[in-house]
Amino acid sequence: MAYDSFHILQSTAVPLPIENVDTDQIIPARFLKATERKGFGDNLFRDWRYNQDDTPKTDFVLNNATYSGKILIGGHNFGSGSSREHAAWAIYDYGFRCVVSSFFADIFRNNCLNIGVLPVQVSPSFLATLFHAIETDPSAELLVDLPQQTVTLKATGQSEPFEINSYKKENLLNGYDDIDYLNNIKPEIVNFAAQTPL
């Protein structure tokens, strides 16, 4: 499998209530030299996390031990800017398996789906509810149910459905990237080729 399969994720969340977070803020361009998906989590939000002398910025949420979890909650228009897939790699490598926002840039959304991060788009009002709940109680948990396509605030039961492409959903459930998917249906491909005249 290309990555761990995704079914139901129950976790606390890290709030990042900033709008228009672009891919250069997620992973600055100077860290794009590597071609493997390893080590990018160290530089996730690098310029927001660290001072120029590499000391942590105490006021940035990833440096605040109060918040933790496998879910990142971002502001509206998350992942805008350049199409670099390294932004999704950095989020996955850091340990997030789900990003929740009221709007995602299309290329960023697809890059996430290709490597095992589930982008969950919710309404602005539900996003505000999640931010308020987590900032009030950092131990509040979310339940992200991919088979049912719902995200739920466990403490209150408030829930909202989300949309996902059926092909990408199936791949996430199985931990497949596009190559894994093709390998999985290889017998069907071979059979089709054998029955198709040249």
Image (cartoon, rainbow, N blue to C red):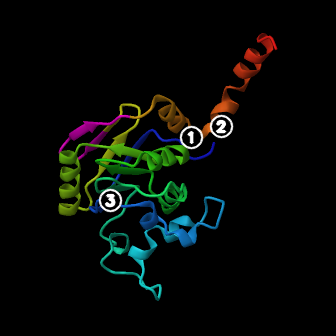
Location of the C terminus by quadrant is top right
Q: Return the residue at label 1.
A: 175
x, y (%) of residue 29?
53, 68
What residue is shown at x 32% (from left), y 47% (from top)?
A: 103
Q: Is residue 39 left or right of residue 51?
A: right
Verify CB contact (< 8 Å) between mark 2 and mark 1. Answer: yes
Comparing marks 2 and 3, which lies closer to the viewer? 3
The x, y position of residue 56, in whole percent, is: 40, 81
Q: Secondary structure at mark 3?
A: loop
Q: Which mark is residue 180?
A: 2
Give the left or right position of residue 65, taking residue 155 as reference: right
Q: Which residue is mark 3?
A: 20
Image quarter of the N terminus: top right
Disc 2 or 3, which lies upstream in sequence?
A: 3
The type of residue carrying mark 1 is Gly
Type of the residue with mark 3: Asn
